[in-house]
Image (cartoon, grey):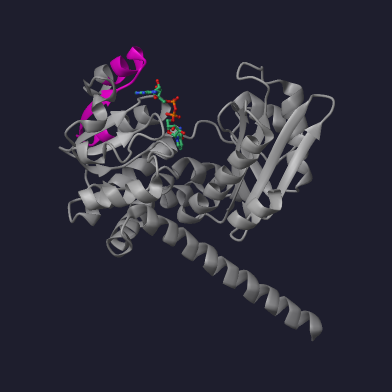
Amino acid sequence: MVFEQAQERGHENVVFCHDSETGLRGIIAIHDTTLGPALGGCRRWAYRSEEEALEDVLRLSEAMTYKAAADDLPMGGAKSVIWIESADQPATEAVAKAMGRFVDRLGGLYIAAEDVGVNTQFIDWMATETKYVMGGETIAAGGDPAPYTALGVVQGMRGALLHLGKPNTLEGLTIAVQGVGALGYNVCKIAAAEGAKLLVTDIVDERVERVVSEFGATPVNGDDIVEAECDILCPCALGRVVDANNVSNLRCTILAPGANNVLDDPDEDSALLHGAGVVYCPDFVNNGGGLMQLAGLYCGFSDEELHRRIINIETVIKTILDDAKNLGSAHAAAMAYARKRIDAGKVQVRTNSGNTAATGSA
Ligand code: NAD
């Protein structure tokens, strides 16, 4: 079953990790390292079965390959999961350390980071056992990625505006932001400084009040924001915000997500958006700024290089959206863009190994 799934999705390694002392049950899935070592989050989740945990780690790690490739990073895709008994099971230092030791054994092929159920403390505990972990606060480098992600999301908006033949400024535009937590707040901050009008919602009232008082945002009731009349809709809360049932109700020109998995069915819904004339910035490209920051720290990018790469999201999104005209949807164009980079990497690897062999036999 594991080989079948790995064959179907193209995984390189699937490592099952068990630690008798702590009871840790983990799986590390390395999907593709053509472009470089694979960076991806470590998720702690109360799966109903081993099959469910395996399915999740295979699906998530595959997505990371395309995300890193589309974000023009010299990195591959991987992810790990820790299968816990129940959602309220405490995250312990002993389990984090055990997981850190398993990550360390892979010698840098996989670099772990935060994901659902794993916070910066857990990452720092892991980091006592391995240097191949990012996103902590005291031991592992990283910190809060939201400002970097937000900058990238805004750059994606600019790319979409350029694609539409408009100036790449947010001045005077109405931007609806769903969820004003770490990411949404930072998107509002940049957009307000540029003179955008903000419509906002959040299930936590104080977060709405903060952006109303700091940026003059207008509050909108709950899910109404998805169908609010605006230039740009920017979901920064949950996944699956747009599906086949509500595409025709959207009243935005551009859908520029910060949230992951914003479409219920990326292939189908992206084509529906295309047909409905809504310009969709593919989520995994648009929100790549945070990954770029972690990858940048790992790869040793200078601050200037990191900034240049995040700013470049504008050009990447415009290129993808221009390509989408022929490919039928922005999601298809983003996948094609990522695959092209991976295929070019494979040719490079083959060429290099060919050269090595030639040198060796001379
Ligand atoms: P966060 O928890 O800080 O903020 C999420 C906000 O959404 C919270 O304020 C929450 O109250 C609100 N929210 C939840 N359900 C809501 C609903 N139904 N309606 C309105 N608001 C709702 O998380 P974040 O770091 O800001 O991340 C937001 C999303 O962006 C997540 O999907 C995350 O995976 C994705 N993302 C974040 C980053 C990053 O750098 N923070 C990077 C890539 C992707």
Q: Name which residue lies at 69% across and 48% down.
A: 1
Q: In which quarter of the image is residue 105?
A: top right
Q: Is residue 348 visible?
A: yes
Left or right of 60 on screen, residue 95: right
Q: Quick one: 149 or 273, which is closer to the camera?
A: 273
* Image location (x, y in percent) of residue 115: 56, 33
Q: What stretch is highlighted in magenta?
A: 191-211
Q: On the rendering, which quadrant does ligand 1 occupy?
A: top left
Q: Name which residue lies at 26% across and 36% down.
A: 246
Left or right of 334 on screen, residue 212: left
Q: Name which residue lies at 38% across and 43% down.
A: 152
Q: Quick one: 258 or 151, which is closer to the camera?
A: 258
* Image location (x, y in percent) of residue 189: 31, 30
Residue 39 vertical position relative to residue 96 in the rendered view, above or below:
below
In the rendered image, residue 204 lying in the magenta stretch gets the answer: yes
* Image location (x, y in percent) of residue 335: 44, 57
In the rendered image, residue 172 lying in the magenta stretch gets the answer: no
